[in-house]
Image: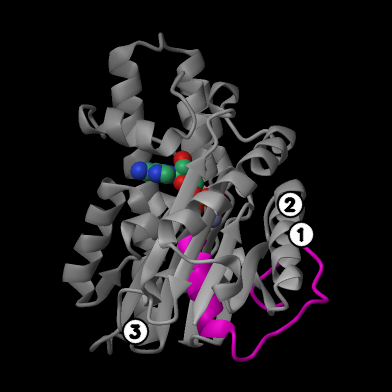
């Protein structure tokens, strides 16, 4: 069985053709560059770029995989959450292909696809914790199995990726800010600035990053933003984020797994999971708590259609719904 999937929820336009046995015949990810000078994604520009790119990369993917559209058995697209313009373009385009070829269309929840992405290359023993860290979300899920997923904590304001992007903007670095901050932080002193760690004494598994960004802004206003400041602030900010995640995860692991961790794991998914400094923080938890931290393949961390195709393969037996509505605020329970 061949699956054709699209991802257009934010600023990546992506298509993937995957076989049921997980072989990827083609996977194209076009990261839109039109937003770079704006320091964040401009929804209208994103929609226009999706319209231009989607059809073109669909043709390329078919050519690369050497198959015809009517060889595809299942079509799927991200249907939320995300920017409504991109969701409408991707879902309508892909649904049209499915109707034109008389094949089922499966709407895929972007967050669920991120969560399931680490199941692609890892054997999971349940229960399982998943930390989802992207530009739009910071969430922790508890999974009894891959169909029983409960949200147990999330950010009450900015997402982690968003905080990286906003701090990068304050420091004059380009968008997306996460990789830029990570690069600068390598040469900086992480103890240069003391930044707040909101909600760490709160019993919930919720996060807050907006105050952290404001604090960086206030310090930046009192300093000259030169090379040394950028390096030291990047390192201090990244350390602060690492400390917050470590504290929250340590507490949760003790509470949920009752220190009976044998064979259990925590997955970290989404664009921010690319960050090697944060991975080092998770490695420390791994050693201390005797629990494994797992990740999806690198090409499934940032937004991509391969994770949409994979989620489709996992879900297609239960769900053939043409009557969905794209939903910019879709949650995992809907
Ligand atoms: O998962 P993703 O591609 O899109 C969303 O669903 O939001 O995540 C994008 C986010 C951006 O905020 C970007 O700055 C961040 O992931 N990111 C990183 C790194 N690479 C990407 N943040 C920190 N360190 C990185 N190396
Ligand atoms: Zn995403």
Residue positioned 69% across, 55% down in the render: 90
Is the C terminus in the top left, top right, bottom left or bottom right quadrant? bottom right
Residue positioned 51% across, 25% down in the render: 169
Name the residue carrying label 3. Answer: 124
Residue positioned 35% across, 27% down in the render: 233
Q: Indicate the quadrant where residue 40 lies.
A: top right
Query: Ligand 2 closer than 8 Å to the CB at disc 3?
Result: no
Single out the mark in the foreground, 3 or 2: 2
- Where residue 45 appears, as percent x and y from the top left, is 69, 32
Q: Closer to the N terminus: mark 1 or mark 3?
A: 1
In-front residue for pair 287/58: 58
Q: Please give the range of residues in magenta.
A: 305-334
Residue 89 numbered tag = 2
Q: Residues within 10 Å of mark 2 (few under 14, many from 20)?
A: many
In-front residue for pair 75/163: 75
Residue 208 position (above or below residue 185): below
Q: Is residue 88 magenta?
A: no
Residue 92 numbered tag = 1
Q: Is residue 333 magenta?
A: yes
């Amino acid at each position: 069985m061949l699956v054709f999937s699209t991802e257009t929820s934010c600023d990546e336009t992506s298509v993937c053709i995957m076989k049921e046995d997980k072989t990827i015949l083609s996977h194209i990810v076009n990261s839109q560059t039109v937003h770079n000078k704006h320091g964040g994604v401009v929804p209208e520009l994103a929609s226009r770029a999706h319209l231009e790119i989607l059809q073109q990369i669909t043709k390329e993917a078919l050519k690369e995989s050497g198959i015809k559209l009517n060889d595809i058995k299942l079509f799927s697209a991200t249907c939320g959450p995300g920017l409504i313009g991109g969701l409408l373009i991707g879902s309508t385009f892909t649904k049209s292909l499915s109707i034109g070829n008389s094949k089922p269309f499966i709407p895929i929840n972007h967050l669920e696809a991120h969560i399931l992405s680490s199941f692609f290359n890892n054997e999971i023993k349940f229960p399982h914790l998943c930390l989802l860290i992207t530009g739009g979300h910071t969430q922790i899920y508890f999974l009894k199995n891959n169909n029983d997923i409960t949200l147990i904590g999330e950010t009450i304001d900015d997402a982690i990726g968003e905080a990286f992007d906003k701090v990068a903007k304050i420091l004059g670095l380009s968008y997306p800010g996460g990789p830029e901050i990570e690069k600068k932080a390598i040469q900086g002193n992480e103890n240069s600035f003391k930044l707040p760690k909101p909600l760490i004494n709160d019993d919930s598994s919720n996060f807050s990053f907006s105050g952290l960004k404001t604090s960086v802004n206030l310090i930046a206003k009192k300093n000259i933003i030169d090379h040394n400041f950028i390096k030291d602030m990047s390192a201090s900010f990244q350390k602060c984020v690492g400390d917050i995640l470590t504290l929250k995860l340590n507490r949760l692991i003790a509470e949920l797994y009752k220190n009976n961790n044998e064979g259990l794991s925590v997955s970290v998914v989404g664009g921010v999971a690319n960050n090697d400094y944060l991975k080092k923080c998770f490695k420390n938890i791994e050693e201390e708590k005797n629990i494994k931290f797992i990740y999806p393949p690198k090409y499934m961390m940032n937004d991509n259609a391969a994770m949409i195709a994979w989620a489709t393969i996992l879900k297609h037996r239960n769900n053939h719904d043409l009557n969905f509505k794209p939903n910019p605020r879709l949650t995992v329970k809907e």
